Amino acid sequence: QVQLVESGGGLVQPGGSLRLSCAASGRTIIINAMAWFRQAPGKEREFVGGINWSTYYADSVKGRFTISRDNAKNTVYLQMNSLKPEDTAVYYCAAANLGWGTSRRTDYPYWGQGTQVTVSS
């Protein structure tokens, strides 16, 4: 099994920045694809960005968000810049044993508990 724990959420003003972290533990050796999703109240969970051999992003965050990882720490990061009120959501980290990148929620069997990001003045 793989356990994922997100951290770094909070309240930020429009135009501000936050960095989320996702620490993986357990059988991390089987993980080769990780992603970030988000879910706003009353909306479906949506793909934000992912990383395997490269990074890929949803159009809504491209150019503002950056995913990176520290393999030594089994941690993936989501750097969020130029935040907008519409970025307000619970952000989830997800992981899978896949050889390719995917934005499909159902492809990821492992999930964290989520961290709240609120963008408001």
Image (cartoon, rainbow, N blue to C red):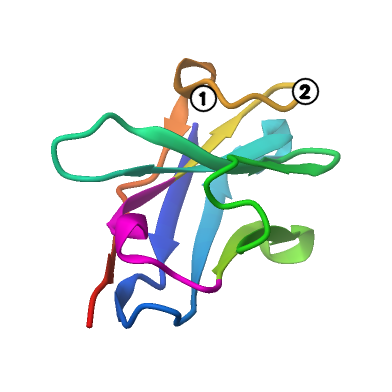
Q: Say which element carries label 1.
A: loop
Q: Residue, x 71% and y 21% (percent of image)? A: 98
Residue at label 2? 100
Q: Residue, x 37% and y 58% (percent of image)? A: 87
**Magenta range:** 81-92
Of residues 39 and 73, the one drawn nearer to the viewer in this rendering? 39
Residue 90 sits inside the magenta stretch:
yes
Residue 65: % across, % down:
60, 61
Of residues 15 and 103, the one drawn nearer to the viewer in this rendering? 15
Tell me, for residue 108, which label it has, or none: 1
- Horizontally, residue 52 falls left or right of residue 90, namely right
Quarter containing the C terminus: bottom left
Residue 84 sits inside the magenta stretch:
yes
Q: Residue, x 60% and y 43% (percent of image)? A: 49
Q: Label 1 sits on what residue type?
A: Tyr
Q: Residue furthest right?
A: 53
Residue 30 position (above or below residue 117)? above
- Horizontally, residue 17 falls left or right of residue 42, namely right
**Residue contact between numbered discs 1 and 2, judged by CB atoms under 8 Å:** no
Residue 35 position (above or below residue 45)? below
> What is the quadrant of residue 51 in the picture?
top right
Of residues 17 and 15, the one drawn nearer to the viewer in this rendering? 15
Q: Residue furthest left?
A: 42
- How far, Cα to Cα, is label 1 from label 2? 12 Å
